């Protein structure tokens, strides 16, 4: 039997065990003492910093989006108005309670219960952070929720301004609209500062200049407990947001409205630009849409309805639709034949109403024929037989293709809007690769009058006229004139004219082309319809056949003043009316009103009265 006195009597084995235990305990105590000293004294500040980071959550503070003005910089076209967004904190609700709350919110927010639940993936159900359910919510809706807050556990809201488009109608295709970021967009934009609650531009200027308009979000840091719940009274806005920059467009809202009314409810487009700078003064595409509709209850349904509309109201026809240029393309043919000197401009071609080429007969638009005419008269009268002849006998497809590309056809202009299409300049190589068929003489016949496979956009047609006006130079068309500070209003960046293309064509050639285009107005096809006395106009009509059922596109591409002392006074106007409209040869008629309104400083109604257009008067 063991007695405590045995150790005192000098049991060496037991004494060794006691000493070892004491050493181990002392060493452990010293180690933990040193470790605690290191944690609290030596590295205490670092660990406190880490602990605060773990307990701190970031919440973005949305930046005010920049306003958009027309070139006069007086009244905004687009601004922000107060609104709210509704959130749910899923961590505060069980799965069953979340289902109930979503069902109660659905009719108030005009959403489906499933739509609300889809915004809160199961992986987020444990989070004590708010997840946005719907933005653009009115104060009245928030009041309805707050009055019954006991029925909406886990529901909160925050201020989130929405866009207000003060000018609606045709300007929508220029400005565009904004919306919530999609998962696909977030994957692309995440590394550029975008997050799941970002509102970004979806179309038009709003999309093209989104990073300038959106500014930079601030950050609010919030402390949470071990379960991730906010600790009351610990909110602090550490980093304030930076306001988005304001944009000043090249658009003149008065000219925009004039063009909109001149086109009317006809599917088509209008482009007005300054050829010596590339500034777009007006861009109209019909039908259009009202982006304000997307930010009201039922906005999603309205968006879906517009998306399914067979008239394609979201399509900006000025830059996103290619059409056969028809007889307006004869301006390119005229330039080519003068510059190449392959066919004397005074040599006459006898038009008898048609021409036999290969095994086919190709008709002129004037079935009785024009009789003998030279180049000047050929363009003025828009004689198809004349251009069939020079296309096949004097130029050939390779030269026609070369000059088409010199005028910018077949490639985008680089305008500062998304979605521009390049059109098509066909060639023998193209036809072989696409159709596995050789180029035929009939193809050259068709392209010589702007038909066949050739397609151009209205903005490209405007550049074509600009090249004539500028003696070979084309400036990149653009819609933003200035970027301004949102607080001081000072210009931070001014958009200067950028040379897009310069063609090596003699100035004397362009002088003759201008004379020929003026002849279209004074002695040719446009004489009866371009009746304005406010300015001298030079241009070219175009009537493009579509299919075989007597449907026609209507073009008019022109500029004024014809002989301007100051080049800055000149404007190019291109009107295009699609064949789906009832035929009324409206493109030159619309241009007549537009030129009258611009140069007489008149509204649409005043221009119609001055021109005595009885068929538009009430």
Image (cartoon, helix red, strand yellow):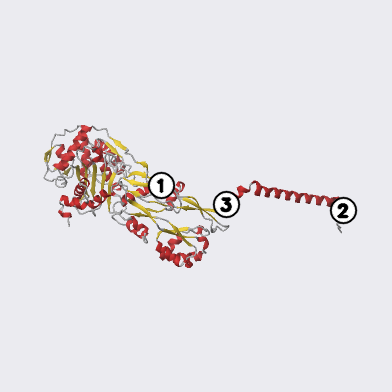
Is the C terminus in the top left, top right, bottom left or bottom right quadrant? Answer: bottom left
- 575 with respect to 69 (left or right): left
- 284 with respect to 62 (left or right): left
Q: Earlier in the sequence, mark 1 or mark 3?
A: 3
Q: Which residue is mark 1?
A: 211
414 or 538: which is nearer to us?
538
Q: Earlier in the sequence, mark 1 or mark 2?
A: 2
Spot occupied by residue 189 in the image (x, y as percentages of width and height): 44, 48
Spot occupied by residue 10 in the image (x, y as percentages of width and height): 87, 51
Spot occupied by residue 192 in the image (x, y as percentages of width and height): 45, 46
Q: Does the rendering let one see residue 388? A: no
Q: Quadrant of residue 443?
A: top left
In this view, the residue farthest toward the front is 488
Q: Which residue is mark 2?
A: 8
Label 1 environment density (alpha carbons within 10 Å; few <14, some 14–19, many ≥20): some
Please state which of the two labelled residues, at mark 1 or mark 3, is closer to the viewer.
Answer: 3
Q: Report, in whole angstroms, how far the alpha carbon at label 1 lies from the one at label 3.
A: 32 Å
Spot occupied by residue 86 in the image (x, y as percentages of width and height): 44, 60
- 117 with respect to 592 (left or right): right
Secondary structure category for the residue under label 1: helix
In the rendering, which numbered label is found on residue 52?
3
In this view, the residue farthest toward the right is 9
Secondary structure category for the residue under label 2: helix
Q: Are marks 1 and 2 in contact (CB under 8 Å)?
A: no
Up/down of 379 relative to 25, above or below: above
Is the N terminus in the top left, top right, bottom left or bottom right quadrant? Answer: bottom right
Label 3 environment density (alpha carbons within 10 Å; few <14, some 14–19, many ≥20): few
């Amino acid at each position: 039997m063991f007695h405590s006195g045995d150790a005192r009597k000098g049991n060496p084995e037991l004494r060794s065990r006691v000493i070892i235990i004491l050493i181990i305990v002392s060493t452990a105590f010293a180690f933990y003492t040193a470790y605690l000293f290191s944690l609290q004294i030596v590295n205490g500040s670092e660990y406190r910093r880490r602990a605060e980071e773990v307990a701190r959550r970031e919440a973005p503070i949305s930046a005010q989006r920049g306003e958009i003005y027309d070139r006069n910089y007086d009244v905004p076209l687009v601004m922000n108005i107060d609104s709210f967004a509704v959130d749910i904190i899923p961590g505060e609700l069980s799965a069953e309670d979340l289902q109930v709350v979503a069902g109660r919110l659905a009719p108030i927010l005009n959403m489906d219960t499933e739509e609300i639940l889809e915004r809160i993936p199961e992986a987020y159900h444990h989070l004590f952070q708010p997840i946005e359910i719907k933005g653009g919510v009115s104060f009245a809706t928030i009041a309805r929720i707050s009055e019954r807050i006991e029925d909406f556990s886990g529901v909160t809201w925050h201020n989130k301004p929405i866009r207000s488009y003060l000018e609606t109608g045709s300007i929508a295709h220029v400005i565009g609209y904004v919306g919530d970021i999609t998962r696909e967009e977030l994957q692309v934009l995440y590394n550029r500062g975008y997050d799941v609650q970002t509102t970004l531009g979806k179309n038009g200027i709003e999309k093209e200049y989104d990073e300038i308009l959106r500014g930079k979000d601030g950050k609010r840091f919030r402390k949470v407990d071990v379960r991730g719940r906010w600790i009351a009274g610990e909110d602090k806005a550490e980093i304030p947001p930076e306001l988005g920059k304001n944009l000043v467009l090249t658009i003149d809202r008065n000219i925009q409205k004039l063009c909109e009314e001149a086109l009317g409810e006809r599917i088509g487009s209008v482009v007005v630009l300054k050829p010596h700078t590339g500034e777009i003064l007006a861009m109209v595409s019909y039908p259009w849409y009202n982006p304000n509709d997307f930010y009201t209850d039922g906005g999603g349904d309205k968006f879906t309805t517009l998306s399914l509309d067979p008239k394609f109201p979201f399509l900006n026809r000025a830059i996103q639709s290619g059409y056969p240029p028809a007889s307006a393309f004869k301006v390119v043919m005229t330039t080519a034949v003068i510059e190449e000197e392959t066919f004397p401009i005074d040599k006459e071609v006898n038009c008898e109403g048609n021409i036999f080429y290969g095994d086919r007969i190709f008709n002129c638009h004037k079935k009785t024929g024009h009789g003998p005419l030279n180049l000047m008269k050929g363009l003025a009268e828009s004689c198809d037989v004349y251009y069939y002849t020079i296309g096949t006998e004097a130029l050939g497809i390779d030269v026609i293709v070369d000059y088409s590309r010199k005028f910018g056809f077949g490639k985008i202009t680089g305008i500062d809007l998304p979605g521009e299409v390049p059109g098509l300049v066909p060639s023998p190589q193209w036809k072989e690769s696409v159709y596995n068929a050789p180029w035929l003489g009939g193809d050259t016949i068709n392209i010589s009058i702007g038909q066949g496979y050739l397609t151009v956009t209205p903005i490209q047609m405007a550049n074509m006229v600009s090249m004539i006006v500028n003696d070979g130079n084309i400036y990149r068309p653009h819609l933003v004139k200035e970027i301004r500070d949102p607080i001081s209003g000072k210009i931070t960046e001014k958009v200067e004219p950028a040379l897009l293309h310069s063609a090596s064509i003699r100035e004397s050639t362009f002088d003759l082309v201008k004379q020929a285009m003026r002849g279209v107005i004074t002695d040719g096809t446009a004489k009866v319809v371009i009746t304005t006395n406010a300015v001298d106009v030079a241009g070219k009509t175009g009537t493009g056949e579509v299919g075989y059922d007597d449907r026609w596109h209507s073009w008019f591409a022109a500029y004024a003043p014809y002989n301007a002392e100051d080049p800055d006074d000149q404007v190019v106007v291109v009107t295009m009316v699609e064949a789906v409209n009832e035929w009324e040869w409206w493109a030159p008629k619309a241009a007549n009103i537009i030129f009258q309104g611009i140069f007489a400083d008149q509204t649409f109604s005043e221009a119609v009265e001055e021109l005595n257009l009885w068929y538009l008067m009430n």
